[in-house]
């Protein structure tokens, strides 16, 4: 999620209501590097890379591998064209009568803000970048519209209670046209295991049981338990689990469903899979399924998280918004403004202001200050308590969180424009590639996630071209302290290896079809998304007790709330949207816009805090 921590040029005190913004980036020097003589031994840890390969001369900055292809080294999230962003004018230090200030406009922050606004709250979002969305944002280059993060959109259906993106948009009077994806993901795994996760559940089960006929009963029982959890969750009105009046009301209305969720709260998907399934290859496949959900294997993935994703892809399906994922954030931001609340861009929050131990406002890098009844941080908890509250003692419950969870690794991302004829006509939109060794699933650069959103929406690329968006896990430590020349060379080397792997496994001739390519490292994600070490959320240090250790939205600091992927229920678009809904409900109760009971609140929060200590 975007959070407002990285330094950036600030706006003046005046903001026009309709802002046309252009973010200029620099072009670095373009020295030539001969890989024949370049020291490549330090990159031998990259799977598939052999420093003895003769790759010829490649220029750092602009790398032409054929007459059309250009590798850009300008910052990945800078903008090539003007974009229309709804803003607000006249926001000043004297504007202190806000009910809530939200730091960052990722999906979690936007959902929290818009939900509060429709309840009657006056909300101000402070966003460090020039457009909303964070890792659900977009950028445009040379006629291509690229999603910054995942193109796999959950929560965008027209039924059930887990269609949280649809609900969030509807709350502010917005709708978006979507394109159904017939296949959630196509797995390409060791031992030539190929599995398409079809939109229709029966088709998926048929394909999986055909591949593992001896495990048919186990497959049906494991995914059957997923459906039991999903159906329980999908039957409830989703609000804050920290608000007792709502919680008790749901329990009395749906006691069986609530008890089902309570039973599975401390359990992990891997343990339940092993109750029914013995085949090691099938268990490894379930690891890959969970890795997409949580960046860890099934034994470390909470069963509730796994069930939300493994079932919603069939219940509501994956639906891609026409025009790209960035349209979600733009629509929510515009809806927020229409509700009478405000969003300020290029607003780099550096501190949360405390008075007598209560969060009362924020300070920007240019010295401006804004005040509100409540402060909601869409930054990670590490950024919130390590940077925005620098100098303050970290609360005990945050220390406990950091003892249970570590920052998940970041990603290396590659955005490509390719000639359309390199892809077979029946190519699926999303692919997960792990060719040779299951042990490499969690290793840096081991597995590759690939999205081709132009399979669904051709308007995102120039005619006759497709977009390839590639992710592979990478730690920021691999990229620190490299001189600019070495840093650029390493990005090109890693990209070269990944292209070779995709050519071999999926698309022969891919390299010669590339028209445009940009590579982003974990440092890129840290810079533009303001996430500590470029992380995409928390990862358990050891086998967790399901979701028991995940904190909710309230914090030990009065008036300060957190929202996003380092809050319950964790990573993923549907999860952070859920976090935003919960946060808005709890804040609304605390400022008198929802029913509340201070006595019951205090008792429930103590109980939830005690339960987290059991993790």
Image: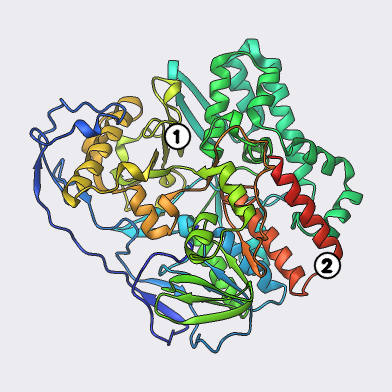
Residue 74: x and y in percent read 24, 57
* Residue 455 seen in the figure: yes
Near mark 1 (Cα within 10 A), the count class, few <14, some 14-19 or many ≥20, is many
**In front of the other: label 2 or label 1?**
2
Q: Does 135 sit above or below residue 120?
A: above
Q: Does 457 sit above or below residue 93?
A: above
User: For this rendering, which residue is in front, 171 or 270?
Assistant: 270
Q: Quadrant of residue 611?
A: top right
Q: CA distance from mark 2 to mark 1?
A: 49 Å
Left or right, 597 with reference to 351: right
Q: Does 23 sit above or below residue 217?
A: below
Q: Which residue does the image show at 33% across and 47% down from the upper left?
A: 521
User: For this rendering, which residue is in front, 559 or 510?
Assistant: 559
* Residue 173 seen in the figure: no
Q: Quadrant of residue 558?
A: bottom right
Residue ID for mark 1: 431
Per the image, label 2 sits on a secondary structure element best described as: helix
Near mark 2 (Cα within 10 A), the count class, few <14, some 14-19 or many ≥20, is few
Outermost residue on the right side: it is: 252
Which of the two labelled residues, at mark 2 and mark 1, occupies the earlier sequence position? 1
Q: Which numbered disc covers residue 230?
A: none
Residue 368: x and y in percent read 46, 82
User: For this rendering, which residue is in front, 467 or 105?
Assistant: 105
Q: Which numbered disc covers residue 598?
A: 2
Left or right, 447 with reference to 293: left
Left or right, 435 with reference to 560: left
């Amino acid at each position: 999620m975007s959070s407002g921590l990285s330094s950036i040029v600030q706006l003046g005190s005046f903001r026009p209501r309709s802002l046309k913004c252009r973010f200029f980036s620099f072009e670095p020097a373009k020295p030539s590097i001969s890989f024949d003589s370049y020291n490549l031994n330090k990159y031998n840890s990259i799977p598939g890379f052999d420093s003895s390969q003769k790759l010829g001369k490649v220029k750092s900055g602009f790398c032409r591998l054929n007459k059309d292809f250009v590798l850009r080294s300008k910052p990945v999230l800078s903008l090539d064209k003007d974009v229309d962003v709804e803003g607000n004018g006249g926001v000043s230090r004297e504007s202190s009568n806000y009910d809530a200030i939200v730091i960052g406009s990722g999906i979690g922050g936007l959902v929290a803000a818009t939900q509060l606004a429709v309840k009657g709250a006056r909300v101000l979002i402070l966003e460090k970048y020039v457009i909303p969305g964070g890792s659900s944002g977009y950028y445009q280059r040379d006629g291509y519209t690229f999603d910054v993060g995942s193109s796999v959109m959950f929560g965008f259906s027209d039924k059930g209670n887990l269609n949280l993106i649809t609900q969030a948009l509807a709350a502010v009077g917005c709708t978006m046209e979507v394109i159904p994806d017939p296949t959630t993901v196509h797995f390409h795994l060791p031992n030539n295991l190929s599995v398409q996760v079809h939109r229709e559940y029966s088709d998926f089960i048929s394909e999986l049981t055909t591949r593992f006929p001896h495990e048919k009963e186990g497959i049906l029982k494991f995914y059957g338990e997923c459906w039991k959890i999903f159906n329980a969750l999908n039957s409830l009105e989703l609000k804050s689990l920290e608000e007792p009046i709502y919680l008790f009301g749901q329990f009395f209305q749906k006691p069986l469903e609530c008890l089902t969720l309570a039973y599975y709260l401390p359990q992990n998907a891997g343990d339940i899979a092993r109750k029914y399934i013995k085949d090691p290859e099938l268990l490894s496949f379930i690891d890959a399924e969970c890795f997409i959900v949580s960046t860890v294997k099934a034994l470390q993935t909470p069963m509730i998280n796994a069930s939300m994703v493994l079932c919603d892809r069939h219940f509501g399906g994956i639906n891609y918004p026409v025009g790209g994922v960035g349209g979600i954030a733009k629509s929510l931001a515009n809806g927020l403004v229409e509700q009478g609340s405000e969003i300020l861009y290029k607003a780099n929050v550096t501190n949360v202001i405390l008075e007598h131990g209560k969060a009362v406002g924020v300070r920007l890098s240019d010295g401006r200050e804004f005040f509100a009844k409540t402060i909601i941080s869409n930054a990670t908890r590490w950024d919130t308590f390590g940077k925005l509250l620098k100098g303050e003692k970290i609360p005990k419950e945050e220390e406990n969180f950091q003892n249970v969870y570590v920052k998940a690794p970041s990603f290396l991302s590659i955005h490509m424009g390719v000639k359309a004829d390199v892809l077979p006509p029946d190519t699926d939109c999303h692919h997960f590639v792990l060719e040779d060794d299951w042990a490499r699933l969690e290793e840096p650069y081991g597995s590759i996630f690939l999205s081709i959103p132009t399979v669904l929406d051709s308007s995102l690329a120039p005619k006759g071209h497709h977009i390839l968006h590639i992710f592979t896990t990478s730690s920021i430590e691999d990229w620190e302290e490299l001189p600019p020349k070495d840093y650029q060379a390493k990005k090109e080397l890693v990209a070269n290896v990944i292209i070779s792997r995709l050519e071999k496994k999926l698309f022969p001739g891919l390299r010669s079809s590339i028209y445009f390519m940009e590579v982003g490292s974990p440092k890129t994600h840290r810079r533009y998304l303001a996430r500590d070490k470029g992380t995409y959320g928390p990862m358990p240090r050891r086998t967790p007790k399901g979701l028991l250790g995940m904190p909710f939205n309230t914090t030990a600091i009065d008036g300060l709330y957190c929202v996003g992927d380092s809050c319950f229920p964790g990573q993923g678009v549907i999860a952070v949207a859920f976090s935003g809904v919960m946060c808005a409900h709890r804040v609304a109760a605390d400022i008198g816009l929802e029913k509340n009971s201070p006595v019951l609140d205090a008792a429930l929060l103590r109980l939830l805090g005690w339960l987290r200590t059991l993790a």
